[in-house]
Image (cartoon, helix red, strand yellow):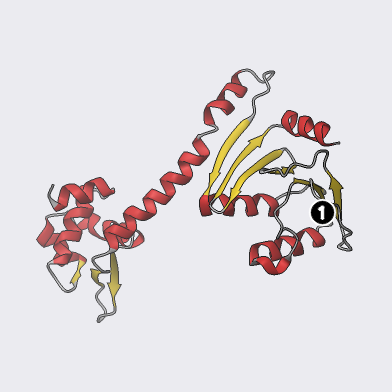
Amino acid sequence: MNIKNLLAKAGLEQHEIDLYLSLITLESATAGQLAKISGVPRTYTYKILESLAEKGFVQQADEASIRHYRVTDFEAALRYIQKQQVELYEIQQEAQSLSAQLQNMAKPSVSTAVTEHLENQPGLDHLWKLLHSTITREIWIVNPPDWWGIADHSKELKKWEQYRIKQHIWERLFETGEVLGNDKRYTERIRLKGSSPQKISLFLVDQYQVQVTSWDPFRALRIESQEMVDLHKSMLE
């Protein structure tokens, strides 16, 4: 596969490819010089160069009064592709619930739980964002990890502790082990029925239910359904 085809698969338009490859052969060039070498109409050249600059392929050189351009570096194409992969992953995560939402729009009377798989560091980041975006005054946590509530464990947990105290958010911690006293504000420890250790941490946040099956690597399932929240609350009470 030749270079033009690779750049086209990466997402560059034909005029962008022509200008970019022409610029690679030169140390720096003006828009007029590039238009002449590449065959791209001069009236489009500045707009195309701006597009390449936004994508990280070229940059404006600090030369004289006439605007010159040069190639950023030869890793630009790889960085651009990697950025697209991240954006595609985020779109795929959001699209997982699309069919359920469309079905619910067609039949509003049908209660549909929207689910989303959270994995690894992006999933963990999503969990912290979810906690920090809540407007509820109460969070339910089943079988929290040993380090939960210890602000020194991580900067994310420290931020959460500061946020929930500031917002007066009450934490109810359901645990299988012995319930110990806790002098922290807005924290309540509740003994769960049964003595066998549980492997799943369950967070109830507004109309979100997050089941954490693993912290390292992070694996969780987020469910958006008021019915599911009500069901789990009734089981714990």
Q: Mark 1 highlights which residue?
A: 169
Q: Residues within 10 Å of mark 1 (few under 14, many from 20)?
A: some
In depth, the one of 119 and 98 nearer the eye is: 119
Q: Is residue 153 above or below residue 103?
A: below
Q: Position of residue 199 (x, y in %)?
A: 66, 44
Q: Is residue 35 above or below residue 205?
A: below
Using the rendered view, name the quadrant where residue 146 is placed. Answer: bottom right
| SS at mark 1 in the image | loop
Residue at x-position 48% and y-position 45%: 90
Q: Is residue 168 above or below residue 13?
A: below
In depth, the one of 67 and 72 nearer the eye is: 72
Residue at x-position 37% and y-position 50%: 84
Residue at x-position 59% and y-position 34%: 115
Judged left or right of residue 98, residue 237 is right
Residue at x-position 86% and y-position 63%: 184
Query: How many numbered marks, from 0 up?
Result: 1
In depth, the one of 142 and 27 nearer the eye is: 142
Q: Position of residue 83 (x, y in %)?
A: 38, 54
Task: Specify the quadrant that holds the C terminus.
Answer: top right
**In the image, farthest residue toward the bottom:** 64
Q: Position of residue 197 (x, y in %)?
A: 72, 44
Judged left or right of residue 74, residue 159 is right
Using the rendered view, name the quadrant where residue 208 is placed. Answer: top right
Amino acid type, mark 1: Ile
Judged left or right of residue 102, residue 159 is right
Q: Position of residue 82 (x, y in %)?
A: 35, 54
